[in-house]
Image (spheres, rainbow, N blue to C red):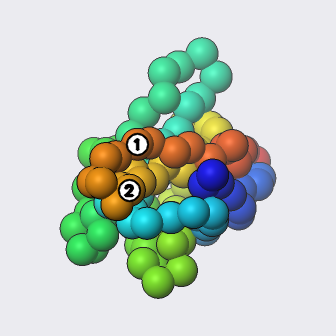
Amino acid sequence: QVQLVESGGGLVQPGGSLRLSCAASGSIFSINDMGWYRQAPGKQRELVATITSGGRTNYANSMKGRFTISRDNAKNTVHLQMNGLKPEDTAVYYCNAVLVNRFQYTRDVWGQGTQVTVSS
């Protein structure tokens, strides 16, 4: 069984910064993409950013230039540095990992979510 545990959420003022972290643990053969998604109240879950095992990144347009995703393959961790936070960034942020088993089958695993609130 594999778990993703997020940390780093909280309350921050507009213009501030937060760094989210996510650690995968358990029986892991390999991880393809890792990423962050978010869900605001009354809205659908949306992509924030993803990163491949090779380090190629993809960002939602509204996050480009403000957020930076990174990962440590040796530690099975992914991070999200968020700068210039806006009230509209308020949401629950979820970590995602695409696991690969030894038969090359893939499956998605999600963390429990961490709340980010941007407010003065």
Residue 40 visible in the shown view:
yes
In the rendered image, the vertical position of residue 107 relative to residue 79, given as above or below = above
Residue 101 bears which disc, if any? Answer: 2
Residue at point 39%, 66% (across, down) = 30
Q: Position of residue 62 (x, y in %)?
A: 34, 45
**Rendered residue at 27%/54% (across/down):** 104
The residue furthest front is 103
| x and y percentages locating residue 112 in the rendered image | 69, 43
Is 93 placed left or right of 105 in the picture? Answer: right
As measured in the structure, the alpha-carbon distance from the residue carrying label 1 to the one carrying label 2 is 9 Å
- Residues under numbered marks 1 and 2 in contact, where contact means CB atoms less than 8 Å apart: yes
Residue type at mark 2 is Asn
Question: Which residue is at a point 70% across and 48% down the rendered structure image?
Answer: 114
Instruction: Please give the label number shown on residue 84.
Output: none
Q: Which residue is mark 1?
A: 107
| Label 1 vs label 2, nearer the camera | 2
Q: Nearer the viewer, residue 35 or 110?
A: 110
The total number of labels drawn is 2
Specify the farthest residue to the top: 42
- Note whether 64 is above or below 88 in the view shown: below
